[in-house]
Amino acid sequence: MYQQIQGITQKPVIKVINTHFHWDHWQGNESYAAQNPKMEIITSEKTKENMSKPDAGGGGVPYIEKQIANMPGEIDKLKADILKETDAAKKKNLESNLQQAETFLQELKQMKPALPTRTVATTLTLKEAGREIQLHALGRGHTNGDLYIYLPKEKVVATGDALIDWMPFLNDGYPEEWVQTLTALEKLDFTQIVPGHGDVQPKGHLAFFRGYLSDLIDAVKKASAGGATLAEMQTKIGDQLAPKYEAGMSKHTLGRYRDRVGQNVEMVHKKVVLKA
Ligand SMILES: [Zn+2]
């Protein structure tokens, strides 16, 4: 990414903003910091905390050791899958994944994580060469520390994983509050969304994504009040919400509706019904 930026401008990167603590959104900070020792890394207060906590789920500094421990197993599995695969295109895809995994493991072993140097409690406005950049912590959602980056003149918002072009990942999330936080985000005047995964979306995507979360919560509450088991709910709700959401949530090879709906049902059941 740094090299791609260099293809557009030779100016130094002076600020990096991490939307939340998940590894795929902040590993790599150190590549920017190495080019400019004065560079600032900005996150919400909670995200900074989460990056250092041993038990913060999928993404802090302690998680790097876990990745290093787990990756050789994943690499072995990819190698076995390549041997078994008969379809040429799929084989090529797996080989590319294997190469990326091996490179990534080497990088992880040498990684010196670059942590936030500045935090935001609720809002912060930056002025960079005349461009206004607002940072907003609007409430809990995908994590307890989601930060939204809003350019009022350009009418663009970058949302991290709190609003994506995939199925949501709920394991570190707060499903009911997430719906409210997205409603707060909707009040900002923007036309384009730069999501944490997938393609740039028009503002209308917010209502679709929020609709999925709130329909999912309602369906899980109803089914569990009716005495359904988790396995029954996973099948029934997956089918029940499919006409409205499957196509829109399955545009990419990752994060597709059928691959995630069962896990989403389980997380909502755990967090909203069992309050665990
Ligand atoms: Zn995430």
Image: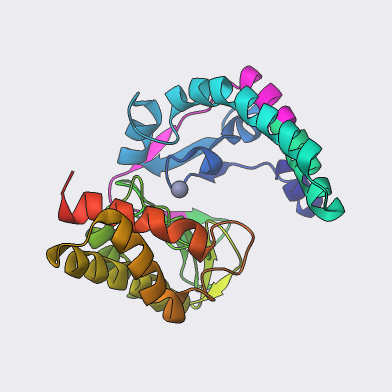
Query: On screen, 227 above or below 174?
Result: below
* Colour setup of the view: rainbow
**In-image side of 25 versus 226 (left or right):** right
Q: Looking at the rendering, in which quadrant would you find the C terminus?
A: top left
* Foreground residue among 62 and 18: 62
Q: Is residue 119 visible?
A: yes
Q: Is residue 50 magenta?
A: no
Name the outermost residue toward the right. 88
Dividing the picture into quarters, in which one does residue 176 lie? bottom left
**In-image side of 210 versus 200 (left or right):** left
Residue in the image at 31% along x and 39% along y: 46
List x then y, in percent, for residue 107. 68, 25
Residue in the image at 52% along x and 75% along y: 248
List x then y, in percent, for residue 75. 68, 29
Residue in the image at 86% along x and 52% along y: 88
List x then y, in percent, for residue 108. 62, 24
* Foreground residue among 45 and 102: 102
List x then y, in percent, for residue 114. 53, 28
Query: On screen, 148 above or below 275?
Result: below
Tell me the magenta residue range. 102-126
Dividing the picture into quarters, in which one does residue 117 lie? top left
**In-image side of 158 versus 54 (left or right):** right
Q: Is residue 103 magenta?
A: yes
Residue in the image at 38% along x and 77% along y: 207
Q: Is residue 134 visible?
A: no
Query: On screen, 143 above or below 256?
Result: above
* Foreground residue among 251 and 3: 251
Q: Looking at the rendering, in which quadrant would you find the N terminus?
A: top right
